[in-house]
């Protein structure tokens, strides 16, 4: 990463995989012969507009990430929001970041086109969130009828004007999406025209995503 770099992609890779089980965190598990995180890094490297990529990870993986993938690394924390704050601090110190995209290392179906478009939208918007409309029936405790059209889900990747998210992000927040920490006056683009990049949480997820990736490779 150079001080002049303005468009950065940050990959959060600090999870220990407690729900996944085993000694190897899920982002380093083998998926069709490659570590899960390699699919994410490859998608990021193909982005037309990215100047640098930083992976926020446990120290034990720093040398491998630098040497094998040629990315910058920052130290992860005990929780996701601490990991993000550490990454933001590293980026502020080592670059002149104007636009930032945050992705997760455990979403190997990430598509480069979404990253390209997110950087484009950040020319006009303060932040970009991938969103999904709710198609199942929705319930709420104490309320019998809920209009699902009033709600949507938020999913990674997220894009930001970096000075804005850096200013307002609080590592102690309980919000799971960083975009929720921005002022309500922020100009946000909700991107509903994007696939849901499934997350690896449990061992069975690897088997399912292996099948999806094989199907993709056969149908390209």
Image (tube, grey):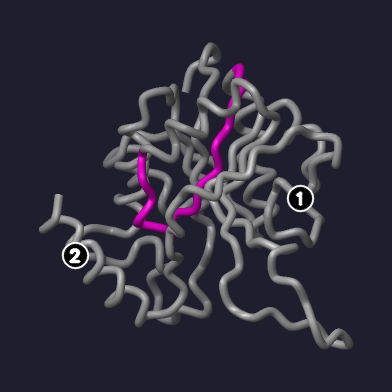
Q: Residues within 10 Å of mark 2 (few under 14, many from 20)?
A: some
Residues shaded magenta: 96-112
Left or right for 190, reference 41? right
Q: Which residue is mark 2?
A: 32
The residue drawn where x is 38% and y is 50% is 110
Location of mark 1 (residue): 180
Q: Dot 1 lies on which element?
A: helix
Q: Looking at the picture, does residue 78 appear above or below residue 74?
A: below
Q: For label 1, count other residues whose C-alpha is less than 10 Å away and answer few (under 14), some (14-19) or many (20+).
A: few
Which residue shows up at 17% across the image and 64% down it? 214
Residue plotted at (58% across, 32% down) = 100
Depth check, mark 1 against mark 2: the one in front is 1
- x, y percentage for residue 123? 60, 21
Q: Earlier in the sequence, mark 1 or mark 2?
A: 2
Total number of numbered labels?
A: 2
Q: Position of residue 132 (x, y in %)?
A: 57, 59
Residue 138 locus on image (x, y percent)? 69, 79
52 versus 77 height, above or below: above
Residue at x 10% of width, y 58% of height? 218
Side of 93 relative to 15 (left or right): right
SS label for mark 2: loop
> In this view, which residue lies farthest toward the top?
4
Q: Nearer the viewer, residue 125 or 28?
A: 125
């Amino acid at each position: 990463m150079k001080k002049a770099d303005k468009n950065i992609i940050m990959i959060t890779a600090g999870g220990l995989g407690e729900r996944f089980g085993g000694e190897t965190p899920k982002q380093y598990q083998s998926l069709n012969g490659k570590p899960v995180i390699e699919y994410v890094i490859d998608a990021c490297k193909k982005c037309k507009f990215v100047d640098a990529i930083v992976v926020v990870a446990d120290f034990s993986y720093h040398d491998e990430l630098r040497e094998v993938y040629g990315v910058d690394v920052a130290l992860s924390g005990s929780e996701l929001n601490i990991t993000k704050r550490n990454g933001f601090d590293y980026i502020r110190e080592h670059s002149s970041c104007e636009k930032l995209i945050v992705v997760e290392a455990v979403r190997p179906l990430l598509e480069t086109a979404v990253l390209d478009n997110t950087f484009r939208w950040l020319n006009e918007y303060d932040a970009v969130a991938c969103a999904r409309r709710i198609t199942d029936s929705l319930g709420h405790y104490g309320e019998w009828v809920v209009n699902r059209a009033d709600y949507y889900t938020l999913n990674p990747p997220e894009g930001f004007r970096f000075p804005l998210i850096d200013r307002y992000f609080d590592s102690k927040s309980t919000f799971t999406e960083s975009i929720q920490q921005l002022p309500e006056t922020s100009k946000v683009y909700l991107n509903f025209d994007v696939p849901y990049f499934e997350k690896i949480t449990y061992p069975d997820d690897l088997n399912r995503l292996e099948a999806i990736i094989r199907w993709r490779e056969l149908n390209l």
